[in-house]
Amino acid sequence: MPSGNPITPQQKRLAFGVHLFTASGVLWGFLALIAAVQHDWRTMFAWLALALFVDGIDGTIARKINITEASPRWSGVALDLIIDYLTYVIVPAYALYSSGMLGGANNVLNLLAMAVILLTSAMYFADNEMKTEDAWFKGFPAVWNLIVFYFFLLSPAEPTILSMTIIFLVVLALGLTTFASFVFVHPLRVAKLRMPTLVLLVVWSVLAIKAIWENVDPAPWVTWGLCIIGVYFLILGYFRTAPVHDRMAG
C-alpha cells in the first residue's frame, strides 16, 4: 500500500539496484545453460544454486524497501517470471533432455517429458492465481531445477528401462499436479511450521552444496539427508490443507 511519504532519489536508486540484483539471475541462468551444453553438471548446478539464492532473497529485500512505490516503472514480478522460466525450466529441461537419463534425443519419452515440462510450466507462470492468500503455491510450482537435481542425484550411471519409466512418470505426475488444488510450501514466506521449515532449508542447502561440489555424486548419508528433507517439503502442503479436508468431511 502507498506509504504517503515522498520517495527520495536515494530510495529510487536503491530500488533500481534491487531490480538489477533480481535481473542478475538471467546471467547466472545463461552461464548454467552454457555449462549444461558442455555437460558440466557440477558447474551448471552451481550457477543454478546462485540463481536460486538471488530469487530467494530479492523479494524480501524488495518488500522491505517498498519497491513498488520506489520504482513503479520496473516490474519485479515480470522480472521474476522471465528469469524463473529460464532457471527453473529451460536450463534443467535441457539438462534432462541431453543427459541421456531418458534415452537419446529422439527417444519418445524424452520428447514427451520436455513437452510436459515446458508446456505446464508456461501455463503455471501465466497463472494469476498461482499463490494462496497465505503465500502457499497452488499446484506444483514448476521448480524443475530441484526435481532435475534429484534425478541426477538418484539416477543410475547407465539408464535402464525402469529408471527411464520412473523419471517420465514423475515428470508427468508433477506436470499434472501443476493444475491440482494441492498446495506447496514457499519456505521463506509461509508462516505455518516456519521455524522447522527454515532450519531444514538451511540444512538442505548445506547438503545440496556438498552434493554439487562432489559432482552430484555425494556420500550416501548426504543423499539420504537430501531425500528425507525433500519429502518434508513435498508433503508439507498437506498440513495446511488437512483442516480443510476435515471440515469438508464434517
Image: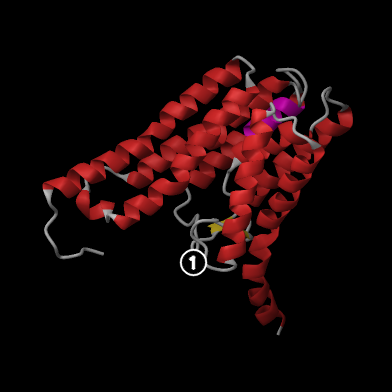
Residue 195 shows in the view: yes
Measured as percent of width and height from the top left, residue 102 is found at 76, 26
Image: 27 above or below 61: above
Secondary structure type for disc 1: loop
* Quarter location, residue 221: top right
* Magenta stretch: includes residue 110: yes
Q: Say what amino acid the circle numbered 1 marks.
A: Asp
Magenta region's main secondary structure?
A: helix
* Quarter location, residue 54: top left
Residue at screen point 63% across, 49% down? 203
Specify the segment rendered in magenta: 109-116
Residue at screen point 42% across, 27% down? 27
Which quarter of the rendered picture does the C terminus lie within? bottom right
Residue of label 1 = 134
Measured as percent of width and height from the top left, residue 10 is found at 15, 46
Left or right, 74 with respect to 247, comes to left
* Quarter location, residue 81: top left
Label 1 environment density (alpha carbons within 10 Å; few <14, some 14–19, many ≥20): few
Image: 102 above or below 195: above
Image: 102 above or below 82: above
Residue 178 shows in the view: no
Residue at screen point 50% across, 63% down? 132
Q: Residue furthest bottom?
A: 250
Q: How is the image coloured?
A: secondary structure
Measured as percent of width and height from the top left, residue 219 is found at 78, 35
